[in-house]
Image (cartoon, helix red, strand yellow):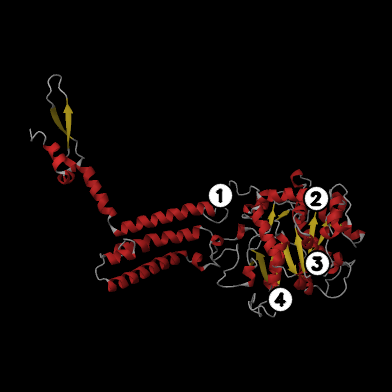
Amino acid sequence: MCTEFAILCQMIHGPVSLAASAPRLLLAKVERPASGNAHRIKAKKLTSPPPAMRLSLRSATAIVSVPAVRALAVGAVVWLSLFVFSHWALWRDPHSAYFHSDNIYDLDYSVVRQKEGRAHLQKYSDGHILEKNETSATHAGENPALCAAFATVARDHPDAARYFSDSLGSMLAGLSAQERASFNLTVLFANSDPKQHKEYGAPWVLALVDHAAGYEGISDAERQELRRLEEAKDFQRKGVLDYIYLLDQCYHQTRAPFIAVFEDDVIFSADWLARTLVGLQALALPREDDVIQAAPLDQPPWLYLRLFYTETFMMWEGDDDWLYGNMYLTFALVSLTTATVLLLIRFMMLQHEPDPRSRFTKSWTLGLRLDVPTIAASSLILAPAFLALFFMAGKYSLPMFSLRGSGDPAKPNRLADAGVFPMEKHGCCSQGLVFDRNQVPGLIKRLQTVGRGQTDLMIEEYCNEAPLRRFALGDQVLQHVGLISSRGMKSVNAQSVYAFYFEEKREEEVKAKQAKALEGVDWDMFRALEAPGNLSTLKPDGLKQGLGILPPLK
């Protein structure tokens, strides 16, 4: 009977030996017979795991116990975690491996600003007569820091009909009286017959714009030439003329130390002016007590501060980025450096504790011994894998290249703290540029000399040859929404001129940035930078010089 109940006795009296013989367990089955009070116990043998399974389990256990395999497993978990996080965080970067094009062009914050702008213009669209106390909140003051100029043309497409009004509405909505008084707003209705534009003479234009008109001071022959360029759709010639006209008008009709030219199919963030003034303030000559220089004094002057750029052209480039241009060598160097560092760590650990399997050695590596296979796996597999993540992120998504955010508190820099960054290359396009007044005559002369082309490329070429430095607000304050181009550009090309991160702005955060930036504006500095002398009116032959009828201004 004891033999019959051998396994049952073992379960009762010998749990340790039972555990040791677990693969050969017997199951005791108790059955009640049909008659009698005796119990009859049957013991049936469990099916043992097949030898192949036992071998595979032992093999798996042995493999997992290898330090190199553990290192690879831990590295894989970290790598996958970073990969998933990047899919969530970097999907807006058009040059990252995680870019999602499905919803990237959906307008979010721009819609908020469109609604605010339309509500603002509606208050002045019914012939509202300004009260005396309202004038200061709707027009420039005596000492504007900025002259902001628009050239707008009539657009026939119904989807483009409100581009201009949305541009000015979002520009003006949410500004304080002090902000509005700080810039002069000029609008050129750039059709040969300005009445073709539906907003020409609109009540809100008369109420909110400091100067709005068609071409002034030109002859009938010149107007006929403009009409010819318009009908021929010679945008590369007429666009240059319009740009010269706006620069000339701001230069001669205001003493503003800075001149901005905008296109008429953009949306402004609520903090555009406050952050622009802070950026211009950082670029202006430093005060005597300013110990942080924006740039060495021997560097060339700057031409413009860019308020809009698209990330479409901002990517890794072999000519500018050594690591990317020499990628095979970069991967080899990273693997070699990783192996060298790990071997040095192993050497130092062995000097302290000769036995590499000791508890002390394990504690240095969270239980992973730095044996030679582990070092090889880390150097040849893990290091290249993480370097691949580095390149997959996209250049300007990496912290060391990022244009968004403020400077490093540990390394104060007046420009970076103001959100201003150099942009000597890839700055596209001409949706919003703010020029240093002192450099405007030279720019006008250059545009007059060249006469034809894409204005933004002409400006870049001028900066390269002069040379002149270029800067941008890292966090754009403009969005380009003009998919229906006034110059006949295909919609797919117009769509690429897009600020990919603009739409993730949130209204409350932008207003907080606006308030903070306004606290840092030095209004006295802008008044001190004002151009001296009396204002001169726009010269009657100003446009003639742009057409090439007269020689350029000396």
Residue that carries the numbered disc 4 in the rendered image: 285
Name the one closer to the observer, 353 or 488.
353
Provide the secondary structure element on which disc 2 rests.
Answer: helix
Question: Residue at horizontal 53%, vertical 59%?
Answer: 394
Label 3 and label 2: CA atoms lie apart by 22 Å
> Could you tell me which quadrant the N terminus lies in?
top left
Q: Which badge, 3 or 2, comes first in the chain's sequence?
A: 2
Crowd band around label 4 with a 10 angstrom C-alpha radius: few (<14), some (14–19), many (20+): few
Q: Nearer the viewer, mark 2 or mark 1?
A: 2
Residue that carries the numbered disc 1 in the rendered image: 100
Q: Which badge, 4 or 1, comes first in the chain's sequence?
A: 1
Provide the secondary structure element on which disc 4 rests.
Answer: loop
For badge 3, the amino acid type reads Pro
Query: How far from the left and from the top, in percent, is residue 452?
Result: 76, 62
Question: Residue at horizontal 32%, vertical 57%?
Answer: 70
For badge 4, the amino acid type reads Leu
Residue that sits furthest to the front in the current view: 37
